[in-house]
């Protein structure tokens, strides 16, 4: 599938000419006439500029003390196929150095939308993460630890916190619940107030998972329970998480180091990001 950015590049713009917005006509129609693009192509081209314009802002959202960076990049806002890369740096002044090979991942079924993390959501953003929108969050997020159905000793030596989940552990996604966007043990909740929650002990995709600090203020409806976990299928996107092969996930968890304050940077347009974040050439 062609990205929005590629779509804008393949179709050349007509020679610039002055355009006014006639009464009763939208700005979009005026721009369409001036550019020579169809409305669909024009929207795609304008949307493709958004991640490039704010890539530098995302790099500035990375904490100075962070020495581990996970980058998930898609070709466009609307695609679910992405690539994960791991980076390390010795200090805040050093460039990021890639560790290992890139990993194939999937994000939301409907692509990405701005989430709530360490970054600022751009004013006028067209895509903002909402509960149930089947988009994964774009932005910069702290990696807070790992959890899973596996016993800690079966995961291997770890340098991040790990929580073993068994029968009764749920991820609450009901915006009306006071436990919204939290992982809880139902047995320890005297009066559960949620109508919807994901049972973390069922299925195999939560054998191992990485927890992200997305919507850490638990704003109702702003998106909940966003994880990196094993994929059930390599062909389709998710309800909002980022998924990958179990072997890659295991390597990622074992590499993470809490003392390095790891963060995830997830966004469209890898070429734009790589041009703006100081990555080492080797």
Image (cartoon, rainbow, N blue to C red):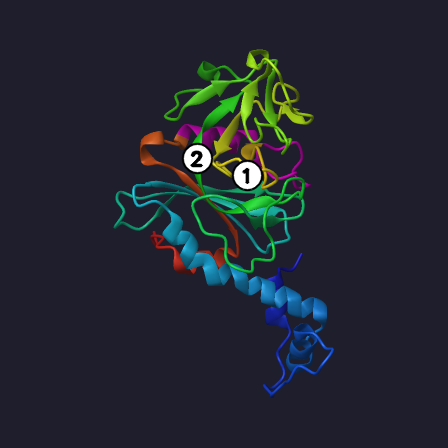
Question: What secondary structure is found at the residue carrying circle 1?
Answer: loop
Residue 21, horizontal then vertical, whole percent: 66, 81
- Which residue is label 2 attached to? 143
- 163 left or right of 78? left
- Can residue 274 be seen here? no
Depicted 124 relative to depicted 203: above or below: below
Look at the image and say whether residue 84 sits in the magenta stretch: no
| Tag 1–tag 2 contact (CB < 8 Å) | no
Magenta part of the protein: which range?
230-254
Residue annotated with mark 1 = 219
Quadrant of the image occupied by residue 29 = bottom right
Question: Residue 7, how many percent across, how many down?
Answer: 64, 66
Q: Nearer the viewer, residue 244 or 22?
A: 22
Q: Does residue 205 appear to the left or right of 52 in the view shown? A: right
Residue name at image x 48 percent, y 19 percent = 163
Helix, strand or loop at mark 2: strand
Q: Nearer the viewer, mark 1 or mark 2?
A: 1
Q: Position of residue 187 (x, y in %)?
A: 58, 11
Whether 119 is drawn above or below 16: the answer is above
Quadrant in the picture for the N terminus: bottom right
């Amino acid at each position: 599938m062609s990205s929005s950015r590629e779509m804008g590049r393949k179709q050349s713009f007509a020679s610039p000419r002055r355009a006014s917005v006639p009464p009763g006509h939208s700005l979009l129609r005026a721009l369409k006439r001036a550019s020579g693009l169809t409305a669909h192509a024009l929207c795609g081209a304008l949307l493709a500029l958004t991640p490039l314009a704010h890539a530098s802002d995302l790099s500035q959202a990375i904490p100075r003390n962070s020495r581990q960076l996970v980058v998930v990049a898609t070709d466009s806002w609307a695609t679910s196929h992405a690539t994960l890369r791991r980076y390390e740096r010795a200090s805040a002044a050093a460039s990021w150095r890639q560790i290992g090979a890139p990993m194939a991942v999937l994000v939301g079924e409907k692509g990405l939308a701005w989430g709530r993390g360490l970054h600022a959501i751009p004013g006028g953003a067209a895509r903002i993460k909402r509960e149930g929108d089947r988009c994964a969050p774009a932005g910069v997020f702290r990696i807070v630890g790992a959890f899973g159905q596996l016993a800690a000793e079966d995961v291997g030596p770890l340098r991040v916190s790990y929580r073993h989940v068994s029968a009764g552990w749920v991820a609450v996604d009901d915006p009306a619940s006071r436990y919204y966007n939290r992982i809880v043990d139902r047995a320890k909740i005297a009066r559960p107030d949620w109508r919807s929650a994901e049972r973390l002990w069922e299925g195999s995709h939560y054998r191992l998972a990485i927890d992200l600090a997305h919507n850490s203020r638990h704003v109702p409806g702003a998106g909940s329970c966003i994880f990196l976990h094993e994929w059930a299928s390599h062909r389709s996107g998710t309800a909002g998480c980022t998924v990958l092969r179990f072997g890659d996930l295991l390597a990622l968890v074992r590499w993470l180091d809490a003392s390095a304050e790891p963060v995830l940077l997830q966004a469209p347009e890898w070429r734009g990001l790589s041009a703006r974040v100081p990555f080492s050439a080797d």
